[in-house]
Amino acid sequence: MDSVKVSFPLDCVAGKVNTTYNQVGVAGVERSGTVSVQAPSSVEWSMTVGRGKLAQQEPPGTGR
């Protein structure tokens, strides 16, 4: 399986809450894949990964 190698670098700061939305169109999404996160051990994080059509607008609350 070929790697897509997409990254979304963010500044992670312990004790600071930050919400970020990213999306990318990738061919072959019907196949299984792996997502990984690299962050300092002092930073708590969560992530949601979905498959489907790309959103046509920014999610509510992004302030953009």
Image (cartoon, rainbow, N blue to C red):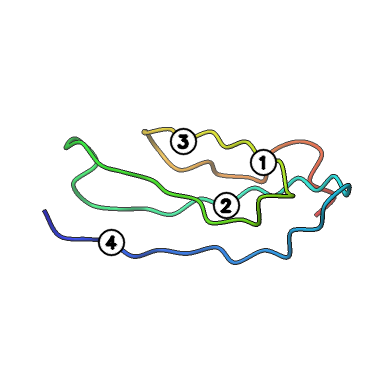
List the residue tagged with mark 1.
Answer: 45
Q: Name the quadrant of the C terminus.
A: bottom right
User: What residue sits 67% from the left and 63% below the top?
Assistant: 10
Pointer 2 with pointer 1, Cβ within 8 A: no
Of residues 23 and 33, the one drawn nearer to the viewer in this rendering? 33
| Residue type of the residue flagged with mark 4 | Val
How many angstroms separate mark 2 from mark 1 (CA)?
15 Å
Distance from the alpha carbon under mark 3 to that under mark 1 = 13 Å
Q: Any mark on residue 2, and which?
A: none
Disc 1, SS? loop
Q: Report which residue position mark 3 lands on.
A: 49
With 5 as the anchor, is 37 left or right in this view? right
Q: Residue at x 88, y 47 (%)?
A: 15
Q: Which residue is disc 4 drawn over? A: 4
**Distance of mark 2 from mark 3, alpha carbons?**
10 Å
Q: Sequence order check: which comes first, mark 2 or mark 1?
A: 2
Question: Residue beneath label 2, please?
Answer: 22
